[in-house]
Image (spheres, rainbow, N blue to C red):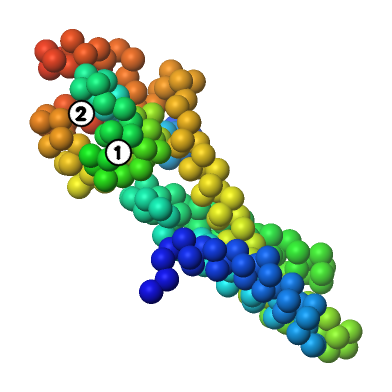
Amino acid sequence: MLTSSAIKRLGILLIVVGAPVVHYVVPGGFWLRTSAAMAAGLMMIFFSREPIDDERVRDLKLKAVHAAFSVSFTLTLVVNWFLNRDFDITRDFDSATNTWRSISGFDLIILTMTVALALFHYWRFQDNRATPASVSAGSGHNPAVTLSNLERGTPGR
Amino acid sequence: MSSVLDIMTRTLYTRLVGSMVNHLRELRASRGWSQGDLAEALNVSRQTVNAIETGKYDPSLPLAFKIARLFKRPIEEIFKDR
């Protein structure tokens, strides 16, 4: 059974080595196949467990995917508008010009996972910081509470 | 109109900073524990303890009970509504 860190390393390997190999070395390489490898790698990185996989990590990952899906779907519509100058999402391949007229599902996954990973690690970085500014701006810490108040059972607020 | 704006502002605020205040930092300090010590006792990461202390994250009910048991205090004494 693969450990979570092994799955993460495998995901990174798939993106850094696998995707370029699929694109440049395997004959008949094209973007859809490459993007599939990248999407798989990003999903392996995002969905594998963290070293300490507690409820905060799961909460942040859920929030990150939630936000990332909205962002990436909006980006998909914007990119498709630039490709087609309309919002018709029923087109997939334009045989007349031999070009894709919508970004693929794999591209959507790449966008979503990239945004989700960025958000998750940014929020995790924020969690890592003691933030006196946010404390005074009304966070969970209550400066009016002193230890003696607590001992007496009369918290400040 | 202003009440809608008020609800939106409150929702955004609670989403950003959590909806409760807590005395976790004071209690931890009273025991002379570091965030790492408390994290180890609760079986969570140090970042999670920091997020709870700074009010960015409201812990789940099981974790809140665990904290209460650890400090031998009722939950409502440690966590309060904003």
Q: Please state which of residues A113 and B40 is positioned toward the viewer in this rendering.
A: B40
In three-dimensional space, the C-alpha distance between marks 1 and 2, rounded to whole angstroms, equals: 16 Å
Looking at the rendered image, the quarter that the N terminus of chain A falls into is: bottom left
Residue at the disc numbered 2: B78
Q: Is mark 2 on a helix, strand or loop?
A: helix
Work out whether A104 lies above or below A94: above
Residue B7 shows in this picture: no
Q: Which of A82 and B29 is in front in this view?
A: B29
Residue at left offset 55%, top offset 55%: A116
Residue wearing tag 1: B39
Circle 1 packing at 10 Å, graded few (<14), some (14-19), many (20+), is some
Which residue type carries mark 2?
Ile
Q: Mark 2 falls within which chain?
A: B
Please tell me which of labels 1 and 2 falls first in the chain.
1
Chain name for mark 1: B
Q: In this view, does A142 lie above or below A24?
A: above
Instruction: Judge whether A90 appears above or below A20 on screen.
Output: below
Marks 1, 2 in one chain: yes
Disc 1 residue type? Ala
Q: Where is residue A143 in the image (x, y as percent from the top left)?
A: 33, 15
The picture places residue B4, in percent across and down from the top left corner, at 45, 37
A28 relative to B51, above or below: below
Dividing the picture into quadrants, the one containing residue A98 is bottom right
**Residue placed at 76% from the left, 84% from the top?**
A26
Q: Which residue lies furthest to the right in this view?
A: A97
Q: Is residue A36 left or right of residue B26?
A: right
Label 1 with label 2: CB-CB less than 8 Å: no
